[in-house]
Amino acid sequence: MKPIVDSRQLVAFAELARCGSFTLAARKLSVTQSAVSHAIKALEKDVGSRLVDRIGKRVQLTPSGRVFLRHADNILREMGAARSGIQLLANTDQSLLRVGAGTTFCQHLLPGVITEFQLSHPTCIPRVEPGGQDRQLELLRSGHVDLAFLQEPPSGKPDDLVFVPLFEDELRFFVSQNHPWAEQQRVPEQALARDTVIVGRRTSHTYRLVSHYFKQERVVLGNVIELGSVEAIKEITKLGLGAGILAPWSASAELANGELLSLPLGRRKLRRLWSLAYWKGRHLTRAEQAFISLSETAARTLALTEAGVSG
């Protein structure tokens, strides 16, 4: 395999061709005349052809040199354009920001964050990829999203990801005002074996957390309905058809207007820590840093909802 031409050799050759003199070229490049001479000799060796003729103190291009100069100019022009494009990106963040988030985050947190983000970064277009925890991990690791809203695994953080903590929530029972538990203001433990409980799909990360929680509490849920979204869980719960398992921030409107009442899952709280995650080792752009900062601000509002309900 032939060696790749050094860009410094191309610069020296192009400058020599313009100046017609080793002395002038060295002065323009702020190097020694010997350095320019060595660069040209190395370049001629790399391309396998004589590129310049030395006539006294002047330099003339050979036929090969004239052909090579056209290519060298094109290469240096493309290199300059690439450098300018990268610099423009660094200075203006003119790019596409790809964010992964579950549907509940898309409804409750992202609208305000994206609105604020576009005011400060009008040339950066946010694109949201919806999906649950497993899907977001897949998108993040495959490079299809830059940032993803994730629950931090209770068993420990993956070594290949960085997690920026946002807020902590608590999964609780939610019931309508006409549900038997609402009048008692508590969840009778024996009722869990016969009453209906509404949760997310079995394949979801939250379902696994809930299942593990009740297993540890030695509680068997008798009748479980699995639904594919938080909105569906809320609607069925409002009809009094069961007790939904949700986080308070995802049902803040229903709590405020009295449609739903929140009750603890049991003696022990089931908490989740939400974070924005990104691939470890990658450099965050200014746009990504700004998006994280805005998400942290918005998350503080959700945390207040949690604190008001969970105590």
Image (cartoon, grey):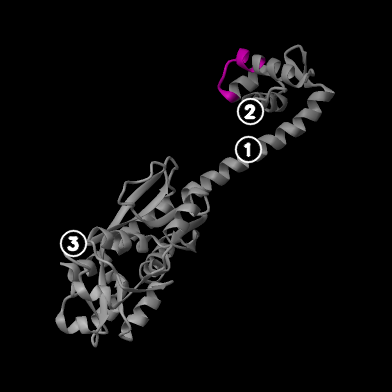
Q: Amino acid at mark 1?
A: Met
Numbered badge on residue 53? none
- The answer for how far apart the CA atoms under marks 1 and 2 are is 9 Å
- In the rendered image, which residue does mark 2 sit on? 7
- In the rendered image, which residue does mark 3 sit on? 268
In this view, the residue in front, 263 or 74, is 263
Q: Is-magenta flag for residue 173?
A: no
Task: Write the residue at 22% across / 61% down.
Answer: 217
Identify the element where label 1 is drawn: helix
- The N terminus sits in image quarter: top right
Q: Amino acid at mark 2?
A: Ser
Residue 166 x, y percent position in the rendering: 30, 57
Q: How many marks?
A: 3
Residue 295 vertical placement versus 14 (above, below): below
Mark with earlier residue (3, 1): 1
- The answer for how far apart the CA atoms under marks 3 and 1 are is 61 Å
